[in-house]
Amino acid sequence: MTTEQRNPQDLPSLEDEYPLTPGQIEAYQKNGHILLRNVLRPGEVAAYEPVIAGMVRALHQNDTPLEQRDTYGKAFIQIMNLWTMNEAAKRFTLAKRFAKIAADLMGVRGVRIYHDQALFKEPGGGHTPWHQDQIYWPLDTDRTITLWMPLVDVSEEIGSMTFVSESHTNGFISRVVISDESHKTLAQYIEAKGLAKVNYGAMAAGDATFHAGWTLHSAPGNPTDRMREVMTIIYMADDTVVLEPQSNAHQGDLGTWLPGCKPGELAASPINPIVYRRD
């Protein structure tokens, strides 16, 4: 039996609590980002990394050489909603441990999944330009958050993400999607406003950053010969309502990640389950 086919019940349970301090919650709500260590323990990383990495290898279809891709294509291999394709990945993505962290940081009663995505930056892969995640999401809320977790150690050389502190409080800044243009436009915005940037440096496998949907962020390229394996999960408050699409990006996400949902309705399709709710 391969690792990807192993019985999910044999994998470590991720249903226990990762307690947060009031100071951590306050720091996240002020800055729009936070680093948490050992969200996934070493034994758990060893169990789940082969599952996720195996799925990425199996599902990745783009054999175009890096140098022939555009900036977005060079940034990472992107495989979405692994949880809907594999019971072991489902155990990871729907983990109560992660979901409760998301709810506690945002200060909400409960959270739903928007979607997950594996982001694997290839050796020699390019940088991820400055952007705001939420320009893609037709969600009428500012209560969204992304878990970003490396499944392998990320050295200073490879680099983790850089966040712009308190940028989430400005909400929507630019409609430009991830591209050279977004990098230039938002870099000028950051400089003009004199906004503070934070990079948490090296991260161990199983550490995680959490950032708000409107937080400006970017990531460096991968100058090494090792794949930078990262798994992400996007959460939204459980009472989030669908926004009337205001762009092609919104329209695309509405059909893909909120199937059957209409503007003004609860963002609660069959692929947006509640993963944590306080009693």
Image (tube, rainbow, N blue to C red):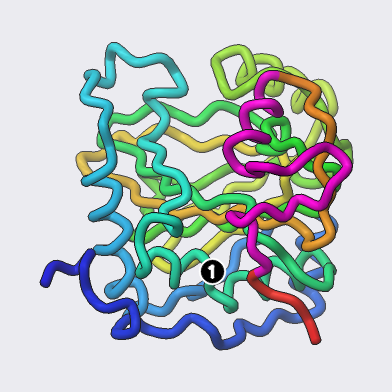
Visible in this render: residue 142? no
The amino acid type, in three-letter code, at marker 1 is: Leu
> Circle 1 sits in a helix, a strand or a loop, which is it?
loop
Label 1 belongs to which residue? 94
Q: Residue at x 34, y 15 (%)?
A: 69
Left or right: 212 as drawn, with respect to 46: right
59 vs 231: above or below: above
Q: How many marks?
A: 1
Residue 107 screen position, x and y as percent: 84, 68
User: What are the residue bounds of the magenta stretch?
Assistant: 248-274
Q: Nearer the viewer, residue 169 or 250?
A: 250
Residue 37 point in image, percent of width and height: 53, 72
Q: Residues within 10 Å of mark 1 (few under 14, many from 20)?
A: many
Q: Residue at x 41, y 79 (%)?
A: 41
Query: Is residue 212 found inside the magenta-colored segment of the image?
Result: no
- At x 44% / y 56%, what residue is drawn? 84
Q: Which quarter of the rendering shows the C terminus?
A: bottom right
Residue 47 % position (x, y): 29, 74
Residue at the limit of the structure toward the front, as seen here: 260
In the image, residue 245 above or below residue 234: above
The N terminus lies in quadrant:
bottom left
Q: Is residue 93 above or below residue 20?
A: above
Task: Give how far across and how far down residue 185 sits, in percent.
Answer: 70, 15
Kindly tell me whether residue 56 is visible in this rendering: yes
